[in-house]
Amino acid sequence: MVFNKILKIQDKEISLKSKTFVIAEAGVNHNGNINIAKELIDLASSAGADAVKFQTFKTEHLILDDVKKAPYQQNTTDINESQKEMLKKLEITKQQNLELKKYAQEKDIIFLTTPFDETSLNETDELDLPAYKIASTDTTNLPFLKKVAKKGKPIFLSTGMSYLSEIQMALETIYEFNKDVVLLQCTANYPIKDEEANLSVINTFKNNFDILIGYSDHTTGIGAATFAIPMGAKVIEKHFTLNKSLSGPDHQASLTPEELFEFIQLVHKVDSFMGSDIKKPNLNEIKTRASLQKCLVANMDIKKGVIFNENNIIAKRTGGKGISPIYWKDIIGKQAMKNYKKNEIIYI
């Protein structure tokens, strides 16, 4: 399977040559309040994220009544309420999504949302968003992946809780209908320990799949995400909140407003550090090269007709004049065409 290496997400390009595409993950940190959601959009836009992403679900289509909360949810929310009760309070309606999309457009940031069920997928389709994000909960949901793939939009596919064989099956399902995919390494807890980030999986993905790679980061603070960029991640996703002390399952594992600004600035700095993949002297090195790299000179007085050898020539800094010692084998064995004094630059 060879997936496309250049994706267009609205006016942004994601490719092997592009800057890192940053998704500020608002998730459910709006707590069901449209005004908080708009504040999150304000923050993501001000911080310089490329996209802000929420989550869309219809609780009755997502979960059975008696399902317990995930362990991290039990630690961050009311232990006496069910997962279904918790999720019900965090729903965003279609009309609210339309309002948030319009607001994001006004703030010049791409609006995305993750559909968690087929009803929400159809509603999301009506929003005419530039891409779909598939959460780790649906990596193994092949019928759902097929329906998303057939929408014909680029897909960000998270892979938390999944085996490599399952990811292979997910990609095969999508590939039949859609080749615009970014595969995201992810560990699906909030937060995770440093040693659970498993950035090395990025190399596993690169070795097994011909596809653009990204990283969805659930480590604490600035965390692991920026380290994924030199490994080849072209998309980074990170949760953020207005206040870590707010009630809700994800706030404690999210970036504060100040951390979000610092995080995106660091992403941009790493992008700058990455520079070009073409190894050659840059413009600022040319003069330095002439000053510091060496050329061949006479290591002693050399008479005309004497054969150059490893003893009578040597490399020294000459200000860029003469023959680079990288060509010394071409000089050895040739006759001197003139008399040379010690330290005189060799010319042929």
Image (cartoon, rainbow, N blue to C red):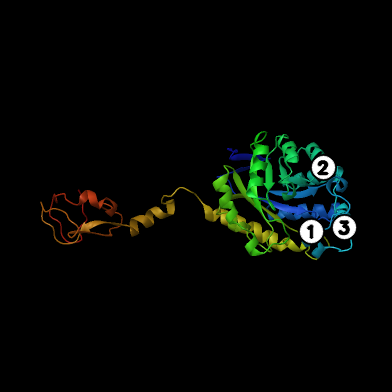
Residue drawn at the location 38% of the way across and 57% of the way down: 288
Q: Is residue 11 left or right of residue 274?
A: right
In-front residue for pair 131/160: 160
* Number of other residues with Cα within 10 Å of mark 2, as a class: few under 14, some 14 to 19, many 20 or more: many
Name the secondary structure under disc 3. Answer: loop
**Residue type indicated by callout 2:** Ser
Q: Left or right: where does residue 345 sit relative to residue 61?
A: left
The circle drawn on residue 82 is 3
Evaluate whether residue 227 shows in this view: yes
Instruction: Classify residue 258 by image quadrant.
Output: bottom right
* Front position among marks 2 and 3: 3
**Tag 3: Cα neighbours inside 10 Å, few (<14), some, or many (≥20)?**
some
Residue 165 coordinates in the image, percent (x, y): 64, 46
Task: Please tell me whether residue 327 is drawn above or below residue 149 in the rendered image.
Answer: below
How dense is the environment of label 1, judged by Cα within 10 Å: few (below 14), some, or many (20 and up)? few
Q: Which mark is residue 109?
A: none
Q: Decide which of tag 2 and tag 3 comes sooner along the chain.
A: 3
Question: Callout 1, which amino acid?
Answer: Ala
The label on residue 70 is 1
Q: CA separation, marks 1 and 3? A: 10 Å
Tell me what residue is drawn at x 19 percent, y 61 percent. 299
Residue that mark 2 sits on: 120
Q: Nearer the viewer, residue 338 or 314?
A: 314
